[in-house]
Image (spheres, coloured by chain):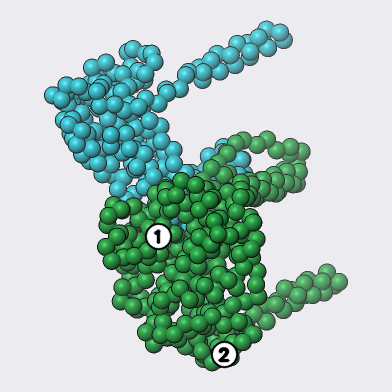
């Protein structure tokens, strides 16, 4: 009897959060639909500046050689329960070993940033976002607004940028989660996506001297340009009529190395490609081109927005 | 008792000696191997394996069953992926050889190396199988073989437990045999493994792993073609 009571109690405990979730889901289902993002030409937007924190940077890591070891294992198995315990212990050890191997790969990749720490310590999100908003080109009106000064009346863009540097130090890569909120709506986004923008590789002999000169101005400016490019791409994508181009394998450059990505090619211009990945995220990246090809009328474009906008 | 131990020792020694053959070392491809442009080079492929999931390290029968069950969704999905570009690899190789001034022909048949007789002459850089019969059969003097052994995903195991995440994989061997001497003129084992970016376990379409698969496919094709680009 007491066992039945215990089971009922556990079941209630397990079911209770589900009921809360169901209610939340139901209320979301009945809530009015969020506004569609208008075409960029008719859109005035503000970029929200959150509390100042350090801009997150990491090294571009390659996990291709992590966790490749296969091997046999002899379990001490005096009986079935002993075997099960041995297998579960083995599973726990393997999982922990895999995680620590991945952490080590990332930690080693991050070492590329060691000489940049004085510059990165001084690089705050407020500076980055303010400059990024001023460099963006898409939209009828653009401004940066502090979170506490947002009057909730207009379109608001929230971003979560994360940068990485290639191991050859020639290139910065931005992964930016962009959320766009309609007027009088700051809970449910009209558009959310991750935008990756890869800068064109620099060709300076001494990359450290280049990025860190003038208190790291080139690194900060390049970061802001990537952010602006990601905003332009996201805003153009938010109102784009979704075409369904065929998936193909696209080659692009990341640093001095050629990479490939499977996705839908949305645009190709000025030595860059814009594609939608298999996960639905967007990526703007330089492609291997003849140097003379990019000079005519393209300028120093990091972004690759839809030509129609 | 001592006699029994001695027998076991001798048997073990005999078995282990059989495994001690020196592996073939890679040989770089070089055009001068066919200085006479009149010599014909045939390019052939072995039968392509289907896109699949392999679980090396899951050695015992129960381990294999456990690995198969754990990866059943990925296995079913892998069968839907195309081998994009791999079947025409021999045409690509032949075109590159022609660009280098060689008389190259594509052999349409799939080659089954296991059906060839063993080589009469052994030694360094000599093929283990006797390819000489193919000289008359296809009217070629040299044979470039593209042997793709595994394509799809690979998830390493340690008995019942995965010891790594699945990766996109292309494993194979490229080699060229001089059909007059049965000697290797090019020998290149190829093993490409590409990790998914971020998490991999995203059924039903596994976008991260699918991307890794196509990345491995491109890298594999590039590796096979690279020696012929000059």
The residue singled out by tag 2 in the image is A152
Q: Is residue B132 left or right of residue A220?
A: left
Name the spot of residue A76 as percent of width and height, x first.
74, 37
Name the spot of residue A257 as percent of width and height, x first.
42, 48
The image shows residue B10, relative to residue A73, as above or below, that is above
Label 1 crowding class (10 Å Cα cut-off): few <14, some 14-19, many 20+? Answer: many
The image shows residue B52, relative to residue B7, as above or below, that is below
Name the spot of residue A262 as percent of width and height, x first.
39, 58
Q: Is residue A143 left or right of residue B189?
A: right
The image shows residue B194, relative to residue A264, as above or below, that is above
Write down the colour of chain B: cyan
Q: Is residue B32 left or right of residue A75?
A: left
The residue singled out by tag 1 in the image is A285
What residue sits 70% from the left and 38% below the top?
A75
In the foreground, A69 or A91: A69
What residue sits 62% from the left and 68% below the top?
A124
Kind of element beneath mark 2? loop
Q: Quick one: which residue is furthest to the left in this view? A: B38
What residue sits 15% from the left and 25% below the top?
B37
**Image chain in green:** A
Kind of element beneath mark 1? strand
Q: Quadrant of the N terminus of chain B?
A: top right
Q: Quick one: which residue is furthest to the front in this view? A: A214
What residue sits 38% from the left and 42% below the top?
B220
The image shows residue B137, relative to residue A202, as above or below, that is above
- Residue B176 picture quarter: top left
**Chain ID, mark 2:** A
């Amino acid at each position: 009897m007491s066992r039945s009571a215990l089971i009922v109690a556990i079941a209630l405990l397990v079911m209770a959060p589900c009921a809360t979730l169901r209610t939340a889901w139901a209320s979301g289902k009945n809530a009015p639909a969020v506004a569609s993002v208008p075409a960029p030409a008719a859109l005035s937007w503000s970029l929200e500046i959150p509390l100042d924190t350090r801009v997150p940077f990491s090294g571009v890591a390659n996990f291709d050689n992590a966790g490749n070891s296969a091997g046999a294992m002899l379990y001490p198995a005096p009986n079935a329960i002993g075997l099960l315990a041995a297998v579960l212990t083995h599973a726990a050890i393997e999982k922990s070993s895999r995680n620590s191997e991945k952490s080590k790969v990332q930690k080693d990749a991050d070492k590329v940033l060691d000489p940049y720490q004085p510059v990165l310590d001084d690089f705050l999100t407020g500076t980055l976002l303010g400059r990024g908003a001023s460099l963006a080109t898409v939209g009828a009106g653009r401004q940066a607004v502090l979170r506490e000064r947002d009057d909730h009346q207009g379109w608001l863009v929230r971003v979560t940028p994360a940068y990485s540097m290639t191991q050859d130090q020639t290139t910065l890569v931005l992964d930016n989660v962009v959320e766009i909120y309609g007027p009088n709506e700051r809970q449910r986004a009209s558009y959310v996506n991750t935008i990756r923008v890869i800068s064109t590789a620099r060709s300076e002999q001494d990359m450290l001297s280049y990025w860190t000169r003038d208190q790291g101005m080139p690194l900060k400016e390049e970061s802001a340009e990537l952010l602006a490019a990601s905003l332009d791409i996201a805003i153009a994508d938010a109102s784009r009529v979704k075409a369904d181009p065929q998936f193909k394998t696209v080659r692009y450059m990341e640093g001095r190395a050629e990479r490939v990505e499977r996705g839908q090619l949305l645009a190709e211009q000025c030595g860059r490609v814009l594609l939608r990945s298999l996960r639905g995220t967007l990526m703007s990246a330089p492609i291997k081109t003849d140097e003379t090809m990019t000079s005519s009328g393209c300028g120093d474009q990091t972004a690759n927005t839809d030509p129609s906008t | 008792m001592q006699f029994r131990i001695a027998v076991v020792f001798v048997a073990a020694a005999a078995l282990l000696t059989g495994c001690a053959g020196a592996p073939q070392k890679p040989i770089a491809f070089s055009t001068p191997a066919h200085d006479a442009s009149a010599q014909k080079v045939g390019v052939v492929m072995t039968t392509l394996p289907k896109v699949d999931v392999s679980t090396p390290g899951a050695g015992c029968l129960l381990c294999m069953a456990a690995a198969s069950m754990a990866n059943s969704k990925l296995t079913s999905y892998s069968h839907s992926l195309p081998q994009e570009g791999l079947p025409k690899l021999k045409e690509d190789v032949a075109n590159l050889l022609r660009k280098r001034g060689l008389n190259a022909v594509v052999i349409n048949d799939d080659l089954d190396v296991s059906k060839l007789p063993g080589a009469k002459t052994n030694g360094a850089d000599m093929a283990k199988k006797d390819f000489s019969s193919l000289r008359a059969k296809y009217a070629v003097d040299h044979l470039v073989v593209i042997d793709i052994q595994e394509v799809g995903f690979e998830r390493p195991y340690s008995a019942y437990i995965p010891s790594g995440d699945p990766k996109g994989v292309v494993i194979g061997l490229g080699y060229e045999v001089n059909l007059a001497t049965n000697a290797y003129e090019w020998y290149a084992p190829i093993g490409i493994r590409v990790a998914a970016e971020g998490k991999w376990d995203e059924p039903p379409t596994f976008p991260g792993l699918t991307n890794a698969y196509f990345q491995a496919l491109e890298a594999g094709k590039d590796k096979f073609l690279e020696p012929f680009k000059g």
